[in-house]
Image (cartoon, rainbow, N blue to C red):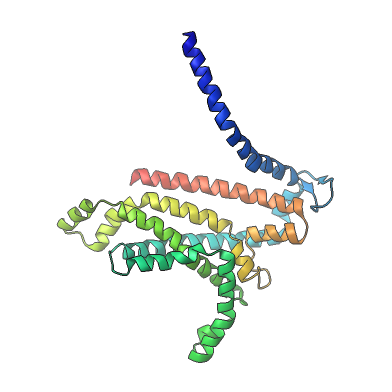
């Protein structure tokens, strides 16, 4: 009995010794900075002074009652997130179905769609900025098409569309890989049985393939949701928030207040609100899609 208790305690001590360094790293990298974020969100601080002024919940009151930039950036982020999630997942599923048909060019096409994802969104933004400003101008002069003469980065509506299209172009390869893996896990005998029963391609897709893609859809929607809510780098490099601040996302608004206006306490409060929003939306999304997976 004593030997058994001694062995159990020894195993617990060994487990604690091996896990303690990991817990310390997690605390230093996440929990301590998060606690400092909560603290600084209740202060008025310019990032330089040694003694931030405690203001309580005044920063949060200002954000929700008197900050029109935050409201506009939140609306921009919501529009962007909804369209990005829907379009990138629909296009990725359609492309995955086509590339899963064992075509001769399938390996090359997969590589072509995935290569943009390797590039940083900042680099992609600068590349497309050159295309929109110089490339489209040259194409307009050579073809005479009016679509190339539009101010894609100088008009609020077109600037929003430009950000959305560039983001989808850069990231669709990532979601494509997820859906191809999901399609390859669909049992072939189910498709063959459906064919024997007289089901057509559309019927097989919506009755067999799509329900069995539920785990892949859950992962892809989760990734698209978190990435779209935190969109920043493509805006920084492509439009810089213009024209006239109409393409400010929440993340870009936080960056502008914190690092350009030196409102570190105020920007930290906005960052905390963004964190809580991402957390709540993510939990709801995962719960909803997991329930749909069980039903499917």
Where in the figure is residue 201, as x and y percent of width and height?
Answer: 24, 62
Where in the figure is residue 96, as x and y percent of width and height?
Answer: 35, 62
Where in the figure is residue 134, as x and y percent of width and height?
Answer: 58, 82
Q: Quadrant of residue 90?
A: bottom left
Seen in the picture, residue 79 relative to 46 is either above or below; the reply is below
Mark yes or no: residue 175 visible.
yes
Q: Which residue appears at 66% of the width and 40% of the height?
A: 28
**Along the line of sight, the residue nearer the viewer: 113 or 72:** 113
Seen in the picture, residue 161 relative to 31 is either above or below; the reply is below
**Along the line of sight, the residue nearer the viewer: 91 or 81:** 91
Mark yes or no: residue 247 visible.
no
Query: What is the total number of numbered labels drawn onto the structure image?
Result: 0
Relative to 229, 28 lies left or right: right
Where in the figure is residue 113, as x and y percent of width and height?
Answer: 42, 66
Relative to 181, 2 lies left or right: right
Q: Which residue appears at 46% of the width and 13% of the height?
A: 4
Seen in the picture, residue 253 relative to 134 is either above or below; the reply is above
Seen in the picture, residue 28 relative to 189 is either above or below; the reply is above
Q: Which residue appears at 56% of the width and 46% of the height?
A: 280
């Amino acid at each position: 009995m004593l030997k058994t208790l001694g062995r159990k305690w020894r195993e617990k001590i060994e487990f604690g010794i091996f896990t303690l360094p990991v817990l310390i790293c997690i605390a230093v990298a996440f929990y301590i900075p998060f606690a400092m974020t909560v603290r600084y969100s209740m202060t008025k601080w310019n990032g330089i002074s040694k003694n931030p002024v405690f203001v309580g919940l005044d920063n949060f009151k200002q954000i929700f009652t008197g900050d029109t930039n935050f409201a506009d950036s939140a609306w921009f982020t919501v529009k962007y997130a909804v369209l990005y999630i829907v379009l990138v997942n629909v296009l990725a599923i359609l492309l995955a179905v086509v590339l899963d048909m064992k075509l001769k060019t399938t390996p090359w096409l997969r590589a072509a769609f995935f290569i943009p994802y390797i590039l940083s969104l900042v680099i992609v933004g600068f590349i497309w900025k050159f295309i929109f400003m110089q490339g489209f101008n040259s194409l307009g002069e050579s073809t005479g098409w009016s679509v190339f003469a539009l101010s894609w980065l100088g008009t609020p509506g077109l600037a929003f569309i430009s950000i959305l299209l560039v983001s989808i172009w850069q990231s669709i390869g990532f979601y494509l890989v997820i859906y191809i893996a999901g399609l390859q896990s669909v049992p072939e005998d189910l498709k063959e049985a459906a064919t024997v029963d007289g089901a057509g391609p559309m019927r097989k897709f919506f009755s067999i393939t799509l329900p069995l893609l539920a785990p892949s859809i859950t992962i892809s929607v989760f990734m698209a949701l978190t990435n779209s809510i935190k969109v920043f780098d493509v805006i920084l490099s492509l439009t810089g928030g213009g024209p006239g601040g109409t393409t400010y996302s929440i993340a870009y608004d936080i960056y502008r207040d914190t690092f350009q206006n030196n409102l570190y306490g105020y920007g930290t409060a906005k960052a905390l609100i963004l964190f809580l929003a991402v957390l709540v939306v993510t939990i709801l999304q995962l719960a909803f899609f997991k329930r749909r997976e069980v039903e499917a």
